Image (cartoon, grey):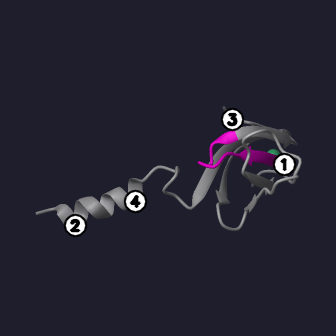
Amino acid sequence: MGGFLDNLKKMFIMPAGSGSKFITFNIICGRCKEEIIVKASKTSDISRLYEGDEAPGGAEYLLRKEILGNKCNNLVHITIYLGSGYNVISKEISGGKFAD
Ligand SMILES: [Zn+2]
């Protein structure tokens, strides 16, 4: 027994990766140093790049997001280029920094 529960557990502990609908990033607010976890949806936050778009080599997707923490009103902007496997090709941030 336990097969059903094991499967259920697997569903919930699945890491944010290729099987997930979300990509997460940890950023740090440039003003108050709050660590913010950004959860970007692969369906609504990410747009597909097309030939002719100005993008780094290998980039297939573009993620642009504005993030507001809880502790202050500093707005952090991120621009991230992703490859076909949602691997990060290049990332830029203003108003804060990436945690890793
Ligand atoms: Zn802040």
Earlier-in-chain disc, 4 versus 1: 4
- For the residues labelled 4 and 2, say whether their Cβ atoms are less than 8 Å apart: no
Residue that sits furthest to the top in the current view: 100
Q: Which amino acid does label 1 sit on?
A: Val
Magenta stretch: includes residue 4: no
Rounded to the nearest whole Å, what is the CA distance between mark 4 and mark 2?
13 Å
Q: What residue type is labelled 2?
A: Phe
- For the residues labelled 4 and 1, say whether their Cβ atoms are less than 8 Å apart: no
The residue to which callout 2 is attached is 4
The quadrant of the picture occupied by the C terminus is top right
Which structural element holds mark 1?
strand
The crowding category of the residue bearing disc 3, from other C-alpha atoms within 10 Å (few below 14, some 14 to 19, many at least 20), is: few
Earlier-in-chain disc, 3 versus 2: 2
The residue to which callout 1 is attached is 76
The residue to which callout 4 is attached is 12
- For the residues labelled 4 and 3, say whether their Cβ atoms are less than 8 Å apart: no
Q: Quadrant of residue 43?
A: bottom right
Q: In which quarter of the image is residue 2?
A: bottom left
Earlier-in-chain disc, 4 versus 3: 4
Rounded to the nearest whole Å, what is the CA distance between mark 4 and mark 3?
24 Å
Is 54 situated left or right of 24 in this image?
right
Residue that sits furthest to the left in the current view: 1
Q: Residue at x 73, y 62 (%)?
A: 45
Q: Which amino acid does label 3 sit on?
A: Ala
Q: Which amino acid does label 4 sit on?
A: Phe
Rounded to the nearest whole Å, what is the CA distance between mark 4 and mark 1?
29 Å
Q: Which mark is residue 99?
A: 3
- The range drawn in magenta is 77-88
Q: Position of residue 73 (x, y in %)?
A: 87, 54
